[in-house]
Image (cartoon, rainbow, N blue to C red):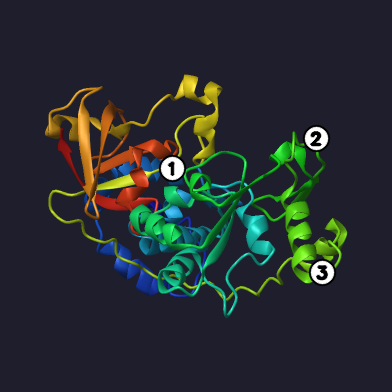
Amino acid sequence: MALGLAKAALNQGKTVAAEGLDSFKQAVSAVSFDQIQAATGLDEAAYTDAVSFIKGHLAVVYGYEFIRSVDATAAVTGALNLAILTGADVYPLDEKNNTQGMLDMGALPGANGKDLFGIIDAIEKGDIRCLFVMGSDLLQLPNRTKVAAALQKLECLVVLDLFPTATAQLANIVLPAAAAPEKAGSFTTVDNRTQRFTAAATPPGDARPDYIILGDLYARLTNGASPSLAALQQEIAPAAKKPLDRPVLAYSAPQAHAPGSMTLLIAPFLRHNGSYTSWSANNLLVAPEAVLRIGTADAGRLGVQDGDKLTVTASGASVTLPVQIRDGIPAGLAVAPAHFPAVGITALQTKAAAGLTVTIAKN
């Protein structure tokens, strides 16, 4: 889709000077709008009409499904190309509402640190024997079978959470966390403005804010005093912003799909976000179950109607879901939610990608 917009912008002369422009034009000219329409379901007129609105300053905003798509390199490169061509600002959005704040606080593995699957590998090797999990149901992440086997090998699993998740049910110790309205903190907007908030309610029972629990654990492990919130904020200053390199246009060709396969997008559905919203009775009134959404073209090809069952297979795992047929979903794309842990949709994933190549058949 970004490629179609870029091609239309070039055709209408609504681009700015950029490094690599000539070679980019040559690469884009080799891709026809018919090919783009086959991939996206949108014809040349749709892209031309969209680009006709470009007047003055722009912003390119894309979501986490885009970042974690099957062909994320081509997708993100396309979005950046569009921004460079039109002189737009770029705002990538993750699913969670404070990912930018987390990244600003340096919440990435250091030189000797490990990401999630590095931790899982270390547990399997016996290098990690105790794990502390905060606000995450690891059994709803990709490679569920591998993660579950690793958690079973731990000598001690401590979980700090709001709900009795599948991971919490495996824990030796569960610590009750305070919900967002029950603690103070900050959110960082997509344009990097820090917005502070204060607690609106008192945590019930033994629940406490994360930083207090961590501070008490630190004090007990070090025989020292629990650090104050002000001290923690001073210690963990926002990471210094690296100067951006000069932007250069770079064409990345989309990956070809295997014959008979489809793309499954695991994405938020109306009134749901993440896996915790399925604990809400009100949200379940609006969207009560997981379904597989496909377009009319694929529904006709597969011979299904609303309510029929389809089986989705990938990575040696299968999930069966009722069908919802929706106009506007292009051929070759199916959409399913990750909000319903019991369905086990993440068993189809081997990495943290919102999109993956699957086969789909009538049940």
Give the alpha-carbon distance from disc 1 to disc 2, as whole Å: 49 Å
Say which of marks 1 and 2 sits in front.
2
Mark 2 lies on a secondary structure that is loop
Establish if 49 lies above or below 35: above
Q: Amino acid at mark 3?
A: Asn
Establish if 293 lies above or below 33: above
N-terminal of the pair, mark 2 or mark 3, is 2
Pointer 1 with pointer 2, Cβ within 8 A: no
Mark 3 lies on a secondary structure that is loop
Whole-percent x and y of residue 147? 40, 58
Identify the residue under disc 3. 223
N-terminal of the pair, mark 3 or mark 1, is 1
Is residue 12 among what the camera can see?
Answer: no
Whole-percent x and y of residue 329? 31, 36
- In the rendered view, does 28 fall on the left or right side of 237? left
- In the rendered view, does 41 fall on the left or right side of 299? right
10 Å neighbourhood of mark 3: few (<14), some, or many (≥20)? few
Q: Residue 142 lies in what quarter of the image?
A: bottom left
Say which of marks 2 and 3 sits in front.
3
Identify the residue under disc 1. 50
Q: Amino acid at mark 1?
A: Ala
- In the rendered view, does 353 fall on the left or right side of 155? left
Q: Tag on residue 22?
A: none
10 Å neighbourhood of mark 2: few (<14), some, or many (≥20)? some
Identify the residue under disc 2. 202
Q: Farthest bottom residue?
A: 111
State the residue at coordinates (39%, 73%). 22
State the residue at coordinates (42%, 70%). 121
Q: Amino acid at mark 2?
A: Thr
Is residue 324 among what the camera can see?
Answer: yes
